[in-house]
Amino acid sequence: MTIRSDLITQLTTNLAAHSGFRVSSELPFDSAGQPLYQKNMKTVYLTEEQKEVTEHVPLLTGEIMQTETVVTGYLVTDAKNQPSDIDTVTSNVLLARTAISSTFDSSSSVETEIEDDRITYTFEYNFLKV
Amino acid sequence: MAYINTSAGDEAVVEIYNVSGASDTFDETAANVLTVPFMQDVTVNNSTGTFRFKTLDNGSESVVTTPATNQVSLNAIVDDSAFFGNAGGAGDVVQNGLFGTSNNKTKVGVRAYFDGTDSGSRYLEGVGYISGLAPTVNPDSPLWITPVTIEIDQELTSALVS
């Protein structure tokens, strides 16, 4: 299991109680140059994992490495008629990071951008593992 | 004249030995030797004590030496087998690990190799007791790290790997 697939599993659970919201495991999520999250509102899409391996502890014989994994998620809703439970939805999407095990540090954040009558939520998950 | 380069393949190594007999003979059997893994740093301390005194006929202090304090100290990531012991291993030090050997107050031999263990490498050796274990961990680093001090009983001696 990858971090991305674990996140999808947890997001599916976390969003089960929110009517109309779902999670897609699709990759890539573009169609004719347009991201699918723009077309399929209320659906969370996750990018492939981006990884960076860096030194965690220097040793006299080499080093112990850490892996930072970043996954980005996208969700679009109607900006004029926001779902009443959108605050809980975004909280639950952010909370999905807690399902990832064996990390010594993890964080999640969300940024919003409004264009036309759509609001795009961009989630970023960061995980550090040794 | 040449500096000692501890680059890859010639790193500093600390080995801990069982000792026996009145002359503290090192048990050289390879399987009985504990090589400390995951070391971050090593310090060999040979601190000669001094006593200063003043006399009426001299404008400056005089000094005489007192016995030296000798130690080998290091910091290392805690390794399960090296710290807690390997019951299936050979020899007391390997079986009891750093903690068990310290807790039992067992006298050990120690060799601090300056540039690996190949022929021609220099090392300092002595006998003493493991002390100063203080494993610590914090949220920013999930790895247990411990200082280790081997308090040397009497002399450190230098030698070359033959």
Image (spheres, grey):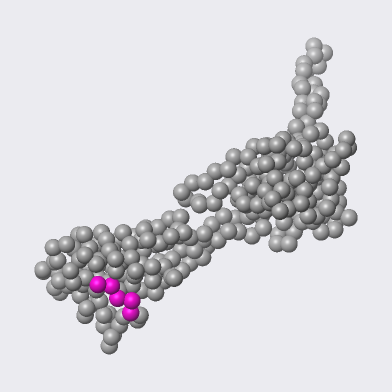
> In the current view of this chain or complex, which residue is farthest to the bottom?
A32
Location of the C terminus of chain B by quadrant is bottom right
The answer to if A25 sits in the magenta stretch is yes
> How many numbered discs sit on the rendered protein?
0
Q: Position of residue B88 (x, y in %)?
A: 71, 53
Q: Quadrant of residue A71 in the image?
A: bottom left
- Image-based side of A85 in relation to B85, left or right: left
Residue nearest the viewer, comparing B21 with B109 = B21
Name which residue lies at 78% across and 46% down.
Answer: B17
- Image-based side of A32 in relation to A102, left or right: left
The answer to if B95 sits in the magenta stretch is no
Q: Quadrant of residue A63 in the image?
A: bottom right
Name which residue lies at 70% across and 41% down.
Answer: B101
Q: Quadrant of residue A22 in the image?
A: bottom left
**Span colored in magenta:** A22-26
Q: Position of residue B40 (x, y in %)?
A: 63, 50
Residue nearest the viewer, comparing A83 with B10 = A83
Q: Is residue B41 in view from this perspective?
A: no
Q: Position of residue A3 (x, y in %)?
A: 41, 68
Q: Is residue A80 above or below residue B105?
A: below
Please identify the dominant SS of the magenta region. Answer: strand
- Image-based side of B73 in relation to B121, left or right: left
Q: Is residue B157 above or below residue B9?
A: above
> In the current view of this chain or complex, which residue is farthest to the top?
B56
Residue nearest the viewer, comparing B155 with A90 = A90
> In the current view of this chain or complex, which residue is farthest to the front?
B88
Name which residue lies at 47% across and 50% down.
Answer: B140
Q: Position of residue B44 (x, y in %)?
A: 73, 42
Q: Is residue A15 in view from this perspective?
A: yes
Name which residue lies at 46% across and 59% down.
Answer: A102
- Image-based side of A39 in relation to A104, left or right: left
